[in-house]
Amino acid sequence: MKCENCTKKECSKKQKNDDTQSTSVDALSPSDGFEEKDEFPTLANAKILLSDCLACDSCMTSEEGARVFQQNQKELFRILNLNKKCDTSKHKVLAVSICPQSLPYFAAKFNLSVNDAAKRLCGFLKSLGVHYVFDTTIAADFSILESQREFVQRYQRRNQEEHALPMFASACPGWIRYAERVLTNLVTSHICTAKSPQQIMGSLVKGYFARQQNLSPDKIFHVIVAPCYDKKLEALREDFYTALYNSQEVDCVLTSGEIVQIMEQKNVSMKDVTEVAVDSLFDEIKEGDVVRHDGKRSDGYLEHIFKHAAKELFGMDVKEITYKALKNKDFQEVTLEKDGETVLRFAAAYGFRNIQNMVLKLKKGKFLYHFVEVLACPGGSTACQ
């Protein structure tokens, strides 16, 4: 099965699996002081089937591909090196934001709890020279709240506006890129307008946090630790850029596997790292554990929106949500019944095959769902490590 409109025999997208890299990274000497030269040579490209991919040439240009490839460990060490120079005018505040979905990778690899993994990851990053380590859950909170509000409004307008429903989640960058570049307005008009957690976190760090620290956005280098390579592509979006300061709101995205590569080259085990609590963007919120939203394999958009809509639209308090698997484990539905009638019908669609089927039914006018949590990767966001 090929991506729609793709004519290539072999996909050019990098495989999303850091543990199977065949090319090793040169070891770092403890005394080299993060020397930039040859620290992290180019990793070998790997193959991936088109059926697993949403970034064929219809979605991503060669220029974008090159810019995505530049987001790697070298960028982090370039800033660390600059901060060691005597010329303080070139120094930058280095801030790292951790996506909670990336933490199970570290927890499983080092046999730790998720909270312990978060604190040790924070400790490791600060030992490198990172100044602040944040948790992106607060950004997901804002994104979910806005998505809840928009869904209720769309549902109430469903009889007046043709494209009010269904509403598709907007948090997955692979899905959004595919929809914007390949699909028509028939689909894109149904996508929630709320920003993704990464976009909101970028605005918080380069906007709110920069003002709190009396810094211009270009004096902060913002790194996101995420489970997904498509987050690198999202960081390059034009609406993710502040022209006044010539600054991206997210400067670099590193995957969990890329962070582990740094640990391995410095001969550091996470079990040997001192635990350090993550920092807080807001003074009234204390530093502490990384919190993850309830949800199957994402930030929990489906569950949060479903419970909110049930309460706001029908006055029903939903405590537990029951998923019903349909054709495959990556397409599941959740329904709400009142007086014998199904009043809400939600779905979780993960992977390109389910996305294709979903779009096909929408075009045929046979789509019955009010909301769909769409993720490009089979298995959801925790499967993208």
Image (cartoon, rainbow, N blue to C red):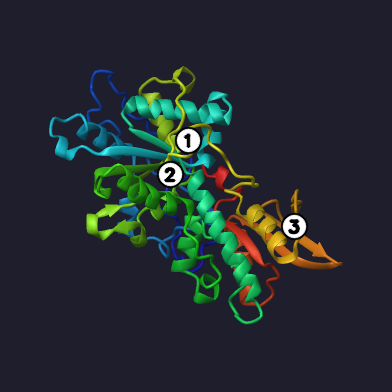
Q: From the viewer's perspective, is 87 left or right of 141?
A: left
| Sequence-wise first label, 1 or 3 | 1
**244 w.r.t. 97: above or below:** below
Coordinates of residue 131 in the picture (x, y in percent) = 33, 33
Tell me the crowding category of disc 3: few under 14, some 14 to 19, or many 20 or more residues within 10 angstroms, Cα based: few
Image depth: mark 1 or mark 3 in front: 3
Q: How many marks?
A: 3
Image depth: mark 3 or mark 2 in front: 3
The residue indicated by pointer 2 is 46
> Along the line of sight, which residue is nearer the eye, 271 or 22?
271
The residue indicated by pointer 3 is 326
Residue type (three-letter) at the residue carrying disc 1: Thr
Q: Quadrant of residue 36?
A: top left
Determine the secondary structure under disc 3: loop
Residue type (three-letter) at the residue carrying disc 3: Leu
Residue situated furthest front in the rendering: 284
Coordinates of residue 113 in the picture (x, y in percent) = 58, 27
**83 w.r.t. 249: above or below:** above
Residue drawn at 56 percent across, 55 percent down: 144
Disc 1 vs disc 3: Cβ atoms closer than 8 Å?
no
Determine the secondary structure under disc 1: helix
**247 w.r.t. 61: above or below:** above
Quarter of the image that includes the N terminus = bottom right
Q: CA distance from mark 1 to mark 3?
A: 32 Å
Q: CA distance from mark 3 to mark 2?
A: 32 Å
The residue indicated by pointer 1 is 20
Residue situated furthest right in the rendering: 340
Disc 2 vs disc 1: Cβ atoms closer than 8 Å?
yes
Q: Quadrant of residue 347?
A: bottom right
Determine the secondary structure under disc 2: loop
